[in-house]
Amino acid sequence: MSRSTVLLLLVTVACLLLAGCLRINVQGDPDTLLKRIASMQRLRVATYNTSLFDDATAGLIHRLERGDPKARDIAAVLQRVRPDVVLLNEFDYDDGHRAADLFQRDYLEVAQPGGGAALLYPFRYLAPVNTGVPSGLDLDHDGKVGGSGRARGNDAWGYGLHPGQYGMLLLSKYPIDMDGVRSFQLLRWSAMPGARRPVDPATGKPWYPDAVWNKLRLSSKSHWDVPVMTPLGELHVLASHPTPPVFDGPEDRNGARNFDELRLWKEYLDNTDAGWLCDDAGRCGGLAPDARFVIAGDLNADPFDGDGVPGAIGQLLRHPRVAPVPAPRSRGAVALAARHGLPRKGDTAEHTGDFGPKSGTLRLDYLLPSRGLKVTDSAVLWPAPGELVPDPSKASDHRLVWADLALDLD
């Protein structure tokens, strides 16, 4: 048992004794006592692709100011599940944090129909992302740089029609160590040893010429390591939203990027001293070997089905530092997958989103805790037909995934 864990549990014991809410016989094995106290602590974490984005600059702000029905449903889902820490994907970022302010004040902190009591998050982290930020390069091979509409988005560092589209927002009931946050928004793809540089199959040459490849950023949005000071101790939330492995051509440039965006977390867990793995503040290296973490986000990779590069998500699911825990499940995914009738190799109860009759349901959203943590309960909030009326979870094509974590001291 680490020194930080022992100190945390001793503080917990002291607080409970002072509160007069716990009687303990202090005779006996101290380790057994500490394990009993640790077993009382639970932390609910969640990830949710909210689809709260807009094609217009400040469009989400204007919608939230007017009263947005989708945002009310998203808030209702969060109020039902009530996570302690939650990552929201596809929440548009703005420099003034106006959208986040509005969503918290006017939606989460107001009881919503189909939801529950008001939900307060005193702590949050949000930062710029690569989506919609002009690269100044011809990334889609149309012979032009920038332009308008989709052409402009295709030449951004990450696809988006304006800077901040499809951003991320982390909300927490517990303090965030802001000085300890690490962001990898600017990390160049070519910096990764053995990066999967896309190749044009028609010519056999690299899709991106050297002048482009040597500047191209790896993260389509950003990769964040956000340390949260929870009742379980310091928990590193490893947050990201890799590009979907589609919307490209035979060179499969998005599939390759998705694979390496996932590999970034593998390298972060593998290589404490990696000299190439440098964050936006210039600090290099991966995560400390004894750090507890949870990988969270819409990772856009199904273990068995879909268009991703085989083995992409397996880099994390089978990583030796990731706890081998059961996947969250739902009945709603099974019912909708059966209605679509598409062939599936994986267990549809583990699916987290529905992408229409052509693509069907897939498992794309993940909470992967580290060893040293155990999952005591988990689910995908995806009710079976008629189980929840009204059903606010339909507000997004993804469903919220949650897990209750506890310390695993055995």
Image (cartoon, rainbow, N blue to C red):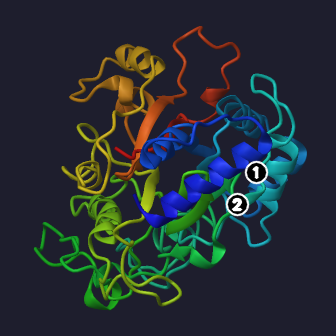
Vertically, is 122 above or below 128?
A: above
- Where is residue 117, by image quadrant? top right
Q: CA distance from mark 1 to mark 2?
A: 7 Å
Q: Position of residue 294 (x, y in %)?
A: 45, 53
Secondary structure of the residue carrying numbered label 1: loop
The residue type indicated by label 1 comes to Tyr
Residue in front for this viewpoint, 64 or 224: 224
Query: Residue reaching furthest front?
Result: 27
Q: Measured from the top left, where is residue 88 in percent x and y? A: 60, 50
Residue that label 2 marks: 124
**Which residue is at 87% across, 37% downward?**
110
Q: Which mark is residue 94?
A: none
Identify which residue, 12 or 342, lies in the foreground. 12
Q: Position of residue 379 (x, y in %)?
A: 48, 29
Q: Is residue 61 above or below residue 401?
A: below
For disc 1, the marked residue is 121
Check whether the beta carbons of the residues at disc 1 and disc 2 lie within 8 A of each other. yes
Amino acid type, mark 2: Arg
Q: Residue at x 29, y 54 (%)?
A: 316
Q: Residue furthest top?
A: 386
Q: Secondary structure at mark 2?
A: strand
Quarter assignment of residue 19: top right
Q: How many marks?
A: 2
Q: Please provide percent x and percent y for residue 31.
A: 43, 48
